[in-house]
Image (cartoon, helix red, strand yellow):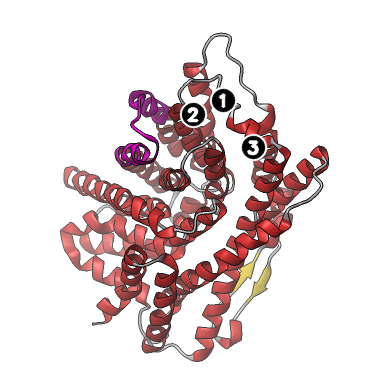
Amino acid sequence: MAYVLALLPIALLIVLSLLRSVKEAVLVAAGVTSGLFFYWGADLSRFIGTVAVAAVTSLNILMIVFGAAFLYNIMDKSGLIGQISHSLDGLHPSREIRFFLLAICLTAFFEGVAGFGTPGAIVPLLLIAMGFNAVLSVCVVLLFDGLAALFGAVGTPVLIGLQLPLGLDAAQLQQISLLSAGLGVLAAGAMLLFIFRLFARYQGPLQYKGTVVLLYLFFALPFCLLAYWVPELATVLGALSMLLLSILFLRRPGSRLELAPWLPYGLLAMLLLLPKLYNPLSRWIGWDIGLPNLFGSGISTSFKPLQSPLIPFLVVGLGVALYKRIPSLYLGDALQKILRVVVVLFPSILVAQLMINSGQTQPSMIGHISELLSGLGSAYPLLAPFIGVIGAFITGSTTISNVVFGASQLQTAQLLGQDPVVLLSLQHTGAAVGNAICLFNIIAAASIANLQNYKEVLARNLLPALSAAGLAGVLGWALLLWW
């Protein structure tokens, strides 16, 4: 019975989101999970502490939403967004080629530079400005982010999510990075089939599927090679490699690229990447507001305001406003987005935190889910990626999914006598894929794109993401049999 109840919040989130609405789903799931939280033996102080953690996490996401909306509004009113929408016209006559180039390259670049859901806050807006459907733009960016999130911001998901808490040595880290990159590339390649159908649904049939696949390989192959040697830079360097190869391949003689309108986003990327390259700055902005033992619950959290992408967004936005002499900062538009988002975002995060922190005297709801799936024996590798997906769906983070479920994946591998590198790679791959259907990402990206129907994004991305995780599981299972 405990296993069924542990799965109930996830079932409610998915089923009600698809049948009713995301807003209704998160509110109902938050109420049910609150009841289960006390059923699991937690007390009131622990509940209040969990609510506080959810509030801090919500604030972090809302800061990104506000910053992205602020910068976009400034650039839109200054005319730069309009210029960006035509800046690559000289690269290739096909709009679909330009769509996929930006969707893959920019998603990977901003994920590798900043993480924090930054690609969903930037890239869909640029695609929409080019005239593409909003649902299509958000869905495709989140699906490609399911690959880019493997190494997130400078390798955090593997370095902080797996190596540090599990005590992995350098050789194991290299093997996991390479194997998960290979699995992720194949899984994302399978998702291309769904993405093509999605594109045809909203924009019409594709004329250059072969070229799009080649563009994908321009990213995928360097990404896999770099994953083994420098996983912390694999995503950023993979994106830059793709951009260079794509320009060399696509550019026509005599064509001209208008790169000037992109300068604010180039500056934004530099500001986001600078702390990763200059350690003293990283230590300075690493200052945090510690919140230990909230309300005597034993639950702690911290808030690092200077590490949020909000500040780079504001700096670049203010710089553009001053340079272009914009008469208004349009703060009201950005604040309206925040108010629309918080009603849905906070309860969804609360569900996640309640599931993680439940169970003072017994395993948490998350622990029960892990225990249930680990009892599958030799078939376990087939479902191992889905544990990572569940972790990302609940927590909104590849890194936290690895932290929450990595230890149980390692323990299961030892109990079943299976290679821990393979199972941890499956966990990691699933955790990255889960970013495509994570409600936090969907709510943030869709709200910035002025989409109120979050349900449609989840409905379009669910099957591709689950299929990708299933393919990764089959490949991992076959690899274990072969070994």
How far apart, in angstroms, are the residues tagged by discs 3 and 2?
Answer: 15 Å
N-term-proximal mark, 2 vs 1: 1
Residue 42: within the magenta? no
Q: Which mark is residue 98?
A: 2
Q: Quadrant of the N terminus?
A: bottom left
Residue range of the region highlighted in magenta in the rendering = 192-218
The residue where tag 3 is placed is 81
Residue 201: within the magenta? yes
The percent position of residue 325, horizontal first and vertical second, equals 83, 41
Mark in the foreground, 3 or 2: 3
Say what amino acid the circle numbered 1 marks: Leu
How far apart, in angstroms, are the residues tagged by discs 2 and 1?
Answer: 7 Å
- In this view, 101 is above or below 14: above
Task: State the SS at label 1.
Answer: loop
N-term-proximal mark, 3 vs 1: 3
The percent position of residue 313, horizontal first and vertical second, equals 69, 49
Q: Which mark is residue 212?
A: none
Q: Is residue 164 visible?
A: no
Which residue is at the front of the view, 125 or 476? 125
Say what amino acid the circle numbered 2 marks: Arg
Give the left or right position of residue 432, taking residue 381 as reference: right
- In this view, 393 is above or below 445: below
Give the left or right position of residue 447, taking residue 352 as reference: right
The residue where tag 1 is placed is 88
Circles 2 and 1: CB distance less than 8 Å?
yes
Q: Is residue 119 visible?
A: yes
Task: State the SS at label 2.
Answer: helix
